[in-house]
Image (cartoon, rainbow, N blue to C red):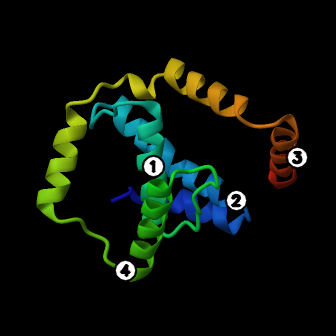
């Protein structure tokens, strides 16, 4: 379950007309904080981001999967978005405990500055210059004056 503060930040982003990915960024940020403070770990930065996006979808952020995602990822995203609409918020204690235990075994390097930087750089490399420019323009338009 996401923290109240994270939900508030995401709602604020939505009110300000920011994109679903910006709203979801709050959940990813929370996940990185959890890893840094030792609540649990993650196998990779990608996994930490995926957990954050899943939490965002379950919290009601209208975030569709990217077109380049695998079929499994797309199906999971649909499942998460359905779960948000169904209203059932809690996970069974057994499943919750198992997930936490598995993540506890993982390392904490996934949320380091270096790992995040590497992930961001490799993600940016996969995008075209036009795509990067377009999103920079969009960000500039929604930035506070």
Q: Residue at x 37, y 29 (%)?
A: 36
Image quadrant of residue 117? top right
Q: Is residue 97 left or right of residue 28?
A: left
Residues tagged 3 and 1 counted as in contact (Cβ below 8 A): no
Q: Residue 47, percent across and down?
A: 41, 39
Vertical side of 56 occupied by 86: above or below: below
In 3D space, how far apart are the residues under numbered discs 2 and 3 (Cα atoms)? 13 Å
Q: Which residue is mark 3?
A: 137
In 3D space, how far apart are the residues under numbered discs 3 and 1 (Cα atoms)? 25 Å
- The residue furthest top is 114
- The residue furthest front is 71
Which structural element holds mark 3?
helix
Q: Is residue 19 left or right of residue 93?
A: right
Question: Residue 87, labelled with which disc?
Answer: 4
In 3D space, how far apart are the residues under numbered discs 2 and 1 (Cα atoms)? 16 Å
Q: Residue at x 50, y 60 (%)?
A: 74
Q: Earlier in the sequence, mark 2 or mark 1?
A: 2
Q: Residue at x 56, y 51 (%)?
A: 69
Q: Which residue is mark 1?
A: 52
- The residue furthest bottom is 86
Q: Which residue is mark 2?
A: 19
Q: Earlier in the sequence, mark 3 or mark 1?
A: 1
Q: Residue at x 28, y 31 (%)?
A: 38
Q: Residue 104, percent across and down?
A: 21, 35
């Amino acid at each position: 379950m996401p923290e109240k503060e994270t939900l508030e930040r995401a709602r604020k982003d939505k009110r300000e007309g920011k994109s679903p990915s910006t709203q979801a960024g709050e959940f990813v940020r929370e996940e990185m904080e959890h890893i840094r403070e030792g609540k649990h770990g993650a196998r990779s930065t990608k996994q930490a981001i995926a957990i954050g996006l899943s939490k965002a979808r379950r919290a009601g952020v209208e975030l569709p999967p990217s077109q380049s995602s695998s079929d499994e990822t797309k199906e999971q995203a649909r499942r998460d978005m359905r779960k948000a609409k169904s209203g059932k918020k809690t996970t069974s204690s057994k499943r919750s405990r198992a997930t936490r235990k598995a993540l506890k075994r993982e390392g904490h390097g996934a949320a380091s500055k270096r790992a995040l930087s590497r992930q961001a750089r490799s993600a940016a490399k996969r995008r075209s210059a036009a795509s990067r420019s377009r999103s920079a323009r969009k960000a500039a338009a929604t930035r506070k004056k």
